[in-house]
Image (cartoon, helix red, strand yellow):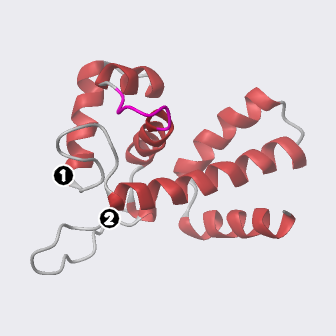
Amino acid sequence: MPARNPTRPRPGSEPHVPCMELTDGEARYLLALRDLNHTGAPPSQAAVARKVGVSHPTALEMIRRLRALDLVAADRLTLTANGTSAALVLTSRRHAAHVLAHEVLGLDEEQSAAEAETLATSLSPVLARRLVAWRTRKE
């Protein structure tokens, strides 16, 4: 992924970090938070750590980073509008990567899901856009 180059914030607004400027780790946490928040109540830090496969202190540090980027709410583990927007883009990438791995490359469901998770957070913006466009044409 390219180095982060946040866009200049407007006076009085929070900085906005486009999805394609997130690190792989930040993107993984956004996907995890989006998935965990679908159950209704905001998840615990322990649940986030388990989902991402890291220690509690590591999860806390990343959550602090995401809050500083205005991607996670300050008072609970929910996505802000910016975080939701980025997570939706990542989810679209993940779905397209899953279709590619499963239907085109013939990986089983479990392998496809694992590969899609990795690809969604590590694709270049150009390849990600092309992959999503391919999946959209396919459906």
For the point 47% across and 25% down, the residue is 51
Predominant secondary structure in magenta?
loop
Q: Which residue is mark 2?
A: 17
Label count reads 2
Residue 54 against residue 27 in the figure, above or below: above
Coordinates of residue 83 in the picture (x, y in percent): 36, 55
Q: Amino acid at mark 2?
A: Val
Q: Which mark is residue 68?
A: 1
The residue positioned 80% from the left and 50% from the top of the image is 100
**Neighbourhood count class around disc 1 (C-alpha, 10 Å): few under 14, some 14–19, many 20 upward:** some
Q: Earlier in the sequence, mark 2 or mark 1?
A: 2
Horizontal relation, residue 31 to residue 9: left or right: right
- Say what secondary structure mark 2 lies in: loop
Q: Nearer the viewer, residue 113 or 75?
A: 75
Vertical arrangement, residue 32 with respect to residue 138, above or below: above
Q: Quadrant of the C terminus?
A: bottom right
Residue at left offset 38%, top offset 27%: 48
**Viewer-closest of 74 and 119:** 74
Structural distance between the alpha carbons of marks 2 and 1: 11 Å
Residue 13, given in percent of the width and then of the height, sits at 16, 72
Q: Which residues are magenta?
A: 38-43
Q: Quadrant of residue 17?
A: bottom left
Amino acid type at circle 1 is Ala
Whether 35 is among the magenta residues is no
Outermost residue on the front side: it is 40
